[in-house]
Image (cartoon, grey):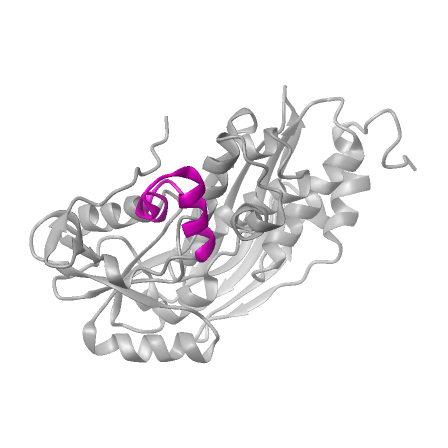
Amino acid sequence: MHAVGSSTPLDEPSKIAEIIVPTMGAEALSTVLTNGATAELLLGAGAQDDCAAFRLEGSHVLVTGSDYVRGPKFSLYEKGFLTNYDIGWYLAGANISDVAAMGAIPLGLLSVVRYPKDLPDSDFTELMEGIRDGARAVGALNVGGDIGSAERIILSASAFGVVEPAGLLTRTGAREGQLLCVTGPTGLAGSAMKLANNGEDVARDEYSALLGKWRRVSPRVAHGRIFAGNPGVTSCIDTSDGLKGAVEALAHASEVSIVVEEGRLPIADSVRRAADRLSCDVLDLVFGDSVDFELVATVDPAAVDAVSEQCGAAGLDLDVIGRVEAGQGVGLRRGAVTTDVPGASWRHT
């Protein structure tokens, strides 16, 4: 048996047999939707087969999405503020967040891990444990994928889940007269990035809430399930490209106008402190390119109280921050004046 931490890293087949399979452990997963449909894991990572396999019975909609972490551009990792475990967790959480935004129950994650040939097995193990724990935190499993060498660590994954046909949430369902809701404050992750790029030590305790948004991505699965169960919630998106980007995407996809009210925005104290340190308008951070993975949804006025009560009973936040109106585009209402929304959305290049 090869000892993890020895000077010569394991080859790929040995990594699977001696690290991945023991790390994932015995896997069992069975999910029941509210309409009685079921999903059961038949083959996971431990089976070492060509594919993972689930038995699906009843009426489901299968949702799936993919994302990846670019090693050289993931600057908080390159600067030493995030560990291998942290970026493994991030990979799982970022992908599962898209499943949550569709109202689905996450089932599994297929991960692709590329790594330098000289990466110590202990670092590889830490990465896989982060992916495993990030998925398990929301009831899903890392059921397979691929590993292989590259010039640096590069991570990719595909997450998938199931939702009742009537509960599927998309970006195209926003309707005039609805209320715009968000599941929590935004701007925390972006604040951490901007402070680090400004030379700040974001590992200090005062920045723990900001850096925590990167270290332990928490997909809003419970919110998504509440939204999926109420027909008054008609559209949803996560804030992986920032709050401004999310609202713009909903407005564009649904061909409506959305107006956010400044006075109703939830703003974390840590983001206010970051704005002071960066000498910028706090709304630039709140709306900017921040991967907070909150959900933004549109809700019928007659349903918003019931949705809020369900969230409150589950210990979940929900804030009404605006309205859907006729027309196209997005705006920010500051008192009696409507202006452009500040901040910059993330743009993939």
Image quadrant where one finds the C terminus: top left
Is the magenta region chiefly helix, strand or loop?
A: helix
Where 147 falls versus 47 (above or below)?
Answer: above
**Viewer-side residue, 192 vs 215:** 192
Q: Is residue 274 magenta?
A: yes
The picture quadrant where one finds residue 267 is: bottom left
Counting every numbered tag in the picture gives 0
Residue 107 sits above or below residue 246 on the image: below
| Residue 84 at x, y percent in the picture | 67, 38
Magenta span covers which residues? Answer: 269-290
* Residue 138 is covered by the magenta coloring: no
The quarter in which the N terminus is drawn is: top right
Residue 14 visible: no
For the residue pair 21 and 291, the one nearer the viewer reads as: 291
Residue at the far right: name it: 1
Residue at the spot 74% in from the left edge and 58% down from the top edge: 26
Q: Is residue 52 left or right of residue 266?
A: right
Left or right of 56 in this view: 121: right
Identified at 59% across, 67% down, the residue is: 30
Residue shown at 10% from the left, 48% from the top: 328
Percent across and percent down for residue 193 are 48, 37
